[in-house]
Image: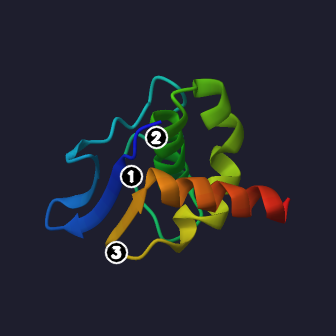
Amino acid sequence: MDNRIYKGERNIDGAEVTVDGEPLDPRLDLHTFTSRGFEWGYEGDGPKQLALAILADYFEDDAQAKAECRAFMSRVVAYFSNEWKMTSADIDLALANVHAAN
């Protein structure tokens, strides 16, 4: 698996999330928690959509992304600050911690 870089920031246009500098696909085709865009820093539909999108891109496996998005949202995405960055290696570690907590 390549080492992707996921970044999020809030600006005048709202919340923007990229993967390797390109907009992250929200994967509304996979599941629509919200069509109002990504959010983070709390537990809710916007952060769930972000967790799903990150994991779908990271795993390249829709079923696995769906299975893990709720725990990833509540243990990782809910704690993101206004600006954040995660590499694939950071996601590996975060998922290991999520699994260890279960």
Residue 42 at x, y percent in the picture: 54, 70
| SS for callout 3 | loop
Element class at badge 2 = helix
Residue indicated by mark 2: 53
* Amino acid under disc 3: Asn
- Dot 2 alpha-carbon crowd within 10 angstroms: few under 14, some 14 to 19, many 20 or more: many
Amino acid type of the residue tagged 1 in the rendering: Phe
Where residue 11 sits: x, y (%)?
Answer: 18, 68
Residue type at numbered disc 2:
Ala
Is any atom of residue 11 visible in this view? yes
Label 3 crowd bin: few (<14), some (14–19), many (20+), radius 10 Å:
few
Residue drawn at (20%, 48%) of the image:
21
**Residue 63 located left or right of residue 50:** right
**Rendered location of residue 63, percent (x, y):** 65, 26
Q: Which residue is mark 3?
A: 82
Image: 83 above or below 60 = below
**According to the image, label 1 marks what residue?**
38
In-front residue for pair 75/58: 58
Q: Viewed as shown, does residue 63 lie left or right of 27?
A: right
